[in-house]
Every structure is written in C-alpha cells, then in structure tokens.
Amino acid sequence: MVSAIVLVRGTAAEDGRDRGDRWTLVVSKEPSGFHTRYNPGADLGRVPLAKSITDGIIEQLTFLIRNDPSKSEGGEIVMAWESTLVTARFSVVQ
C-alpha cells in the first residue's frame, strides 16, 4: 500500500510530477503510458512526495526501494537525481 493506494500483484508504472515545490508520485495501471502518452484515466492514484536536497550531486536518475527498519513490512520509494531527493513511504499488506 502506498498512501491510500492499494496495489495488486501485476504491472504498474510510476512517475513523478513536479509542481514547483510540490511533488506527486503518480501510480498508473498503464505501464508504458507516461511522458508523451500519459493517460490520466489510467491512474491508480497519486501520492504526495517529500522533497529534500542531497549532500552531493547524483549524476544518474536513481530509483530505490528501501526497507524501513522500524516496520516489519514496508519502507520508502526513493527517486534521486542531481541534488534532488523525493520519497514516499509504503507498507505491505497481505
């Protein structure tokens, strides 16, 4: 579960949307539908992203899924590039 979006096993896509200082993670059921072929009707949901600045420069766009040691199942999704880091927390519900 990412925020209030419940994802079932299968294919989904994610994309970050920048609105100035407000970033949003868009989760879609259309895995190839982002950028030039974006279809808002295929959105499963949107999650606010927390934005921070990195200590150094990240030269390549990097996606990470990190465990949260304080939770038995869950963590955070991380996207990082240049000096920007955006994150969204998630939990695994079975």
Image (cartoon, rainbow, N blue to C red):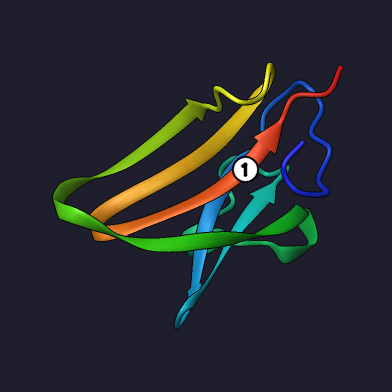
Q: Left or right? Give the position of 28 relative to 87.
A: right
Q: Secondary structure at mark 1?
A: strand
The outermost residue toward the front is 70
Residue under the image location 52 percent in, 39 percent down: 77
Q: In the picture shown, does residue 51 fall above or below 14?
A: below
How far from the left and from the top, in percent, is residue 23?
52, 68
Q: Nearer the viewer, residue 24 or 29?
A: 24
Q: Is residue 3 left or right of residue 35?
A: right
Of residues 73 and 78, the one drawn nearer to the viewer in this rendering: 73
Q: Residue furthest bottom?
A: 20
Viewed as shown, does residue 82 lie left or right of 24?
left
The correct choice, above or below, for 68 with respect to 28 in the image is above
Kindly identify the residue that appears in the image at 62 percent across and 43 percent down: 89
Residue 36: % across, % down:
48, 64
The residue at the point 69 percent across, 48 percent down is: 28
Categorize mark 1 by other alpha carbons within 10 Å: few (<14), some (14-19), many (20+): many
In the image, what residue occupies the spot 41% across and 33% down? 64
Name the spot of residue 66 as percent of width and height, x first.
47, 28
Q: Which part of the image, by quadrant, shows the N terminus?
A: top right
Quadrant of res 39: bottom right
Residue matched to label 1: 89
Looking at the rendering, in which quadrant would you find the C terminus? top right
Q: Nearer the viewer, residue 30 or 56?
A: 56
Question: What amino acid is labelled 1 in the image?
Answer: Arg
